[in-house]
């Protein structure tokens, strides 16, 4: 990392934060923009500044753009690629769980120009803090579109991995310290994860010198996901499927959902040696955690992660929450991490 994180238990978020109501309707996924053209470009930059300021105000150590310039964490990236028709959207079932209106792949995919690199440069200009930038992972990308061209999830995933690698190299050059790939699909398609999911992820990080992370969660706090979680029983062991392969992979950091989830914390033992972003904030409830609750989750995780490898984080993105709730949760995360930091320094 160019700006090394020396502080113990550096805090960060999984990625997205709520947008201001003048930019897009709040508490809604795929919320349409309220501005157009020049006004939209300026509005997105202003929102990014605000989002950064809110993270800084809450004392977050590794900051992000809050994903203020994207409508959605996957489809916005896909829509910038050649070979994709995003006007004639198709409805498909994503994560084996819920219907979503998504872009279609209609020809060979290619990245003709950078997608987020200007946004990353803009964020870099605003702060000297370490920056984490989120990109969708190859498997989650292919699970969030309609493919009328390749007709093979694996083949398309390899194409996306090459494209993601091009983008990641330019993000690194723009000064991003940690590049994170969001792979909620890793918690659903276990055979594919082991056959080619982790391999395509490693293709996406090939040659990078900055740190790399993979974020695996149980999704945003929307109804389809909370309903799904109710079917998973009292012990969620999904992570067990991908962890052995991830432990051997070149990925530096694994970002996980741990707060209020039924994930047995000892599963983290399976990725011993990796840095772990421990989700200590539940994004599926408006109840703001107390600092002590956050601290408790971090203490439990410390049984299985060395303190210098533990990064307190949120379970997932906070885009669908209200700004007030998100602000409260960011502050709770900082305060909870500080409690444990003090304990560790004794
Ligand atoms: Zn997530």
Image (cartoon, rainbow, N blue to C red):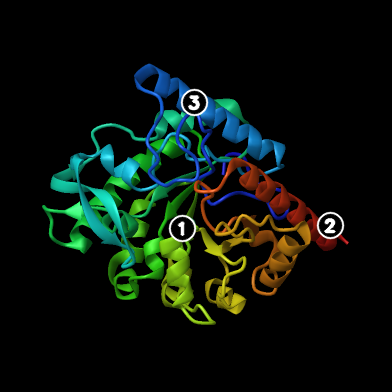
**Residue labelled with disc 3:** 45
Circle 2 — which element?
A: helix
Query: Which numbered circle lies on residue 342?
Result: 2
Q: Which mark is residue 88?
A: none
Residue at x-position 64% and y-position 47%: 325
| Residue drawn at x 53%, y 31% as measured from the top left | 48
Does label 3 or label 2 sit earlier along the sequence?
3
x and y, in percent, of residue 85 in the image? 17, 41
Q: Quadrant of residue 113?
A: top left
**Residue 250 in view of the camera:** no
Say which of 267 and 34 sits in front.
34
Name the residue beneath numbered marker 1. 222
Q: Secondary structure at mark 3?
A: helix
Q: Are marks 2 and 1 in contact (CB under 8 Å)?
A: no
Check contact, mark 3 vs mark 1: CB within 8 A: no
- Kindly identify the residue that appears in the image at 49 percent across and 79 percent down: 237
**Earlier residue among tags 3 and 1:** 3
**Mark 3: is the Cβ under 8 angstroms from ligand 1?**
no
Tell me the quarter of the picture where residue 30 sits.
top left
Disc 2: residue Cβ within 8 A of ligand 1's nearest atom: no
Q: Earlier in the sequence, mark 2 or mark 1?
A: 1
């Amino acid at each position: 990392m160019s700006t090394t994180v020396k502080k113990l238990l550096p805090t960060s978020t999984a990625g997205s934060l709520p947008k201001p109501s003048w930019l897009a309707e709040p508490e809604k996924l795929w919320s349409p923009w309220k501005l157009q053209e020049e006004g939209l470009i300026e509005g997105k930059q202003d929102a990014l500044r605000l989002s950064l300021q809110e993270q800084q105000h809450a004392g977050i150590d590794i900051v992000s753009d809050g994903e203020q310039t994207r409508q959605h964490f996957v489809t916005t990236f896909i829509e910038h690629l050649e070979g994709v028709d995003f006007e004639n959207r198709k409805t498909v079932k994503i994560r084996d769980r819920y219907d979503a209106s998504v872009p279609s792949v209609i020809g060979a995919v290619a990245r003709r120009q950078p997608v987020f690199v200007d946004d990353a440069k803009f964020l870099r200009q605003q702060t000297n803090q370490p920056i984490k930038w989120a990109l969708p992972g190859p498997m989650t990308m292919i699970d969030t579109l309609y493919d009328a061209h390749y007709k093979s999830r694996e083949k398309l995933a390899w194409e996306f991995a090459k494209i993601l690698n091009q983008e990641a190299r330019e993000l690194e050059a723009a000064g991003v310290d940690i590049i994170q790939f969001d792979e909620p699909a890793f918690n659903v398609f276990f055979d594919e994860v082991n056959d080619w999911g982790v391999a395509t992820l490693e293709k996406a990080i090939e040659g990078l010198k900055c740190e790399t992370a993979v974020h695996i969660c149980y999704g945003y706090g929307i109804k389809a996901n909370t309903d799904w979680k109710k079917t998973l029983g009292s012990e969620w062991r999904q992570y067990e499927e991908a962890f052995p392969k991830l432990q051997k992979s070149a990925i530096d950091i694994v970002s996980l959902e741990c707060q209020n989830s039924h994930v047995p914390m000892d599963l983290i033992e399976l990725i011993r040696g990796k840095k772990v972003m421990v989700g200590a904030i539940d994004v599926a409830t408006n109840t703001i955690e107390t600092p002590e609750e956050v601290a408790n989750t971090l203490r439990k995780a410390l049984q299985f992660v060395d303190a210098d490898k533990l990064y307190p984080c949120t379970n997932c993105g906070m885009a669908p929450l209200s700004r007030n709730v998100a602000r409260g949760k960011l502050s709770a995360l900082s305060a909870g991490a500080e409690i444990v930091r003090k304990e560790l320094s004794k």
